[in-house]
Image (cartoon, helix red, strand yellow):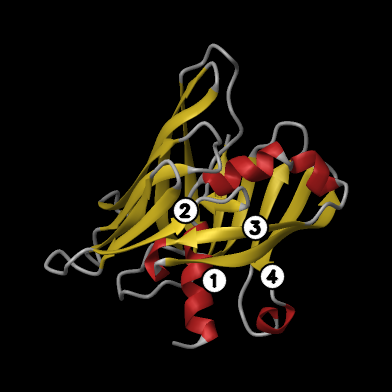
Amino acid sequence: MGHRRIQRWLVGLIALLVFQSPPALHAEIQSFMGKAYNEQGGLEYIERHAITYDEDGVVRSRTTYFDPDERVIGSLVSEYAPLPQFCDYTFEDLRKQYLDGVRLEPERICLFRKQDPDAEEETACLPREDTQIIGQGFHHFIVTHLEAIESGEVYHVKLALPSRLDQFRFRIRKRRIEGDDVWIRLEVDNWVLRLFTPHIDVIYERGSGHLLRYEGISNIADASGECKPVRIDYAH
């Protein structure tokens, strides 16, 4: 399989990563919505998020995806480990009848996928590493390190990708700052592959850590079964 197709799946995963920063200490559940638009400006789908926190931070989250007519087309459920960049999660695309996710074990992470309801589950387990990021833990990693990213720190991470039953090296870096907005790019760590593969841009609000926008390939297929570029705007 070519690098472009592999990276298309890698980039698509990050469309899942759509959290705001934690609420006040005594809050328990945070709800918000995102709207994904295609390159022609049309509404592709809607995301509704419910995130549960305790006094130690994020505990679990549920994202439900709807088409423009408010029909459910997918879901993503995550349970977080003590380090919020790690989580068990299950993602389901109802239109493609596709399922994947991650199961955490004490010393390793196990990736799984099912290409359709009748297919056998495929799995691959990898040793746990401090530089790994799993699923929506990507957002929490950025929020935790936002000030350092603002100052120019570049992070090299391994992104676990259940759809490929493997992990891949990426880097996270600041692109620019405009007022209170920090533009951050996620891109393949290898400079040669970077010339031929897509990237993801996200915008965060300084201070609050709110995610304002995502630009990249969607993880949710459209009605024709294709994962296409989208812009997702988040309301606070």
Q: Are marks 1 and 3 in contact (CB under 8 Å)?
A: no
Q: Earlier in the sequence, mark 1 or mark 4?
A: 1
Q: Residue at x 84, y 51 (%)?
A: 177
Can you say whether 224 is above or below 105 in the image? below
Q: Earlier in the sequence, mark 4 or mark 3?
A: 3
Q: Earlier in the sequence, mark 2 or mark 1?
A: 2
Q: Quadrant of residue 79?
A: top left
Q: Where's residue 90, x and y in %?
A: 33, 49
Q: Where's residue 104, x and y in %?
A: 39, 45
Q: Are marks 2 and 4 in contact (CB under 8 Å)?
A: no
Which residue lies under the disc numbered 3? 157
- SS class of the residue under badge 2? loop
Badge 1 amino acid: Glu
Q: Earlier in the sequence, mark 1 or mark 3?
A: 1
Q: Residue furthest right?
A: 151
Q: Quadrant of the N terminus?
A: bottom left
Q: Viewer-nearest of labels 1 and 4?
A: 4
Q: Residue at x 74, y 78 (%)?
A: 191
- SS class of the residue under badge 1? loop
Q: Which mark is residue 39?
A: 1
| Residue 166 visible in the picture | yes
Which residue lies under the disc numbered 2? 16
Badge 4 amino acid: Asp
Local packing at callout 2 (Cα closer than 10 Å; few below 14, some 14-19, many 20+) is many
| Residue 65 visible in the picture | no
Q: Decide if residue 77 is on the left or right side of residue 37.
A: left
- SS class of the residue under badge 3? strand
Q: Decide if residue 131 is on the left or right side of residue 230.
A: right
Q: Viewer-nearest of labels 2 and 3?
A: 3
